[in-house]
Image: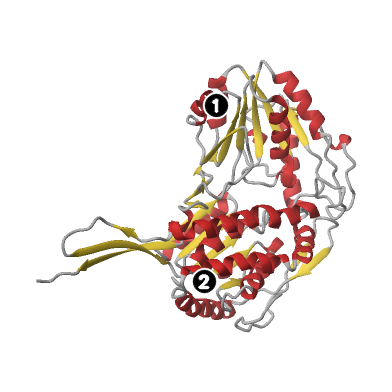
Amino acid sequence: MFAAGRAKYHPRDMPDIVSPIDDQVAYSFRELSEAEALARLDQATEVQRQWARVPLASRIAVCRDMLRRYAEFEEQYAEQLTRMMGKPLAHARGEFRGPMTERTTALCDMAEQALADQVLPAKAGLRRFIRREPVGTVLDIAAWNYPLIIPINVVVPAVLGGNAVMIKHAPQTALVADQLEHAFTAAGAPAGLVQALPIDHVTVAELVARRRFGFVAFTGSVRGGHEVYRTVARENFVGVGLELGGKDPALVLPDCDFDHAVDNLVDGAFFNAGQSCCGIERIYVHAEIYDRFVEAYVAKTREYVLGNPLDPGTTLGPVVDAAAAERIRGHVEQALATGARALTSAADFRVPDLSACYIAPHVLVDVTHEMDVMREETFGPVVGIMKVADEDEAVRLANDSDYGLTASVWTQDVDRGLALLERLEAGTVYLNRCDYLDPGLAWTGVKDSGHGASLSTLGFLSVTRPKSYHLRTVTS
């Protein structure tokens, strides 16, 4: 792990990162004690005071150059990512070349507008404006499923806003925090501005209780979100951003572009082995095209190649670990035991015996909302498809969920689609698209899917605070 410029620490624990590829230890990393973590926090606090005085143009230049510095190690980093969490190697490269680059560039492009002073109309003898100031040091508790782009959503606007950032990454993908730290430091950020923070949950709580963070971001489960929210609120009056689970629905209407809908909804369900908070887990298809849709959907699903994610021909890798695999299989088994049918299963694929983490894509029909697979976040390569009589039934079922991250409607009638999108309870709604984050739009959820917003100009609001300037320029 990169250590240049850091506060020194001594080995405490050496947690293993067990690869889902073959159940072998891929990497180990050192966790910090509370005292060692506090030393890093002290460093971040001091560096942040200096960084806040750096002109915005220079901050933007560092963030842009961070991409170039990351690219210098792209192949090494991509292989690490694949070995840690099982994403096919081409997809690991794509996470950097695609959304990480797109989001960083977009956030840099909008930073000047997002952070500009809000100047009030002129008044005789007065000058008044509102300026965004950094909140200080940001703690980002990042998830493993998209280990690059999840922290980027927080780190880049925070750095642009004049903050320091400490990344407590998921243990399964802990090395990614080091990758990002190294890239920022190589790009000219002062040592300690962006830091990996390899600590356990107990130490996280201990640090948060010291009231040293200006904002805490968490990506993960609903249960984890509740724990983080309570921990922060117990000792702090600071912002908390929660990007939690999803059970995202798609509504497919008879006038959809049929092939486009099938192709995109298969990809939306199974890309990244279904381990996406905005992946498609529920599909409601109008009865008029239901049989045809299911037949085409199954045929497209069977095109996946399940295998070792380091092999170039693999398009679907393992899920992240054995516990996740057990939970996913439990959802499928419960559905089958209560009346569902699996139209694809392990029998349709060559399932590697390298580990228990390889799960074939499952397309389930005859599902109901009494089944976990249609109510709880499965977070795996499983999708349930239901026949609906009309749009009203589709909307009712789509909204019958504790989650509300994204939802999509598939129709060529834009006005009709927009009217349905307005009825759906979700933070992001799509027409003829799914499983994509546009960095120009706010990323947010309703119900149990989260709290706050990242990306877009609104994403800068969480990592800055308003300061009002009221100047009397004429005193006589």
Q: Residue furthest left?
A: 476
Q: Nearer the viewer, residue 130 or 383?
A: 130
Q: Nearer the viewer, residue 143 or 304?
A: 304
Q: Secondary structure at mark 2?
A: helix
Task: Locate residue 416, reporting x and y percent.
Answer: 53, 23
Label 2 Cα neighbours within 10 Å, binned few <14 / some 14-19 / many ≥20: some
Confirm whether residue 239 shows in the render. yes
Confirm whether residue 201 shows in the render. no
Task: Locate residue 420, reporting x and y percent.
Answer: 51, 27
- Please give the label number shown on residue 58: 2
Q: Which residue is mark 1?
A: 414
Task: Locate residue 230, reporting x and y percent.
Answer: 47, 58
With 382 as the anchor, is 442 left or right in this view? left
**Which quarter of the rendered picture does the C terminus lie within?**
bottom left
With 395 as the anchor, is 14 left or right in this view? right
Labels 1 and 2: the sequence-earlier one: 2
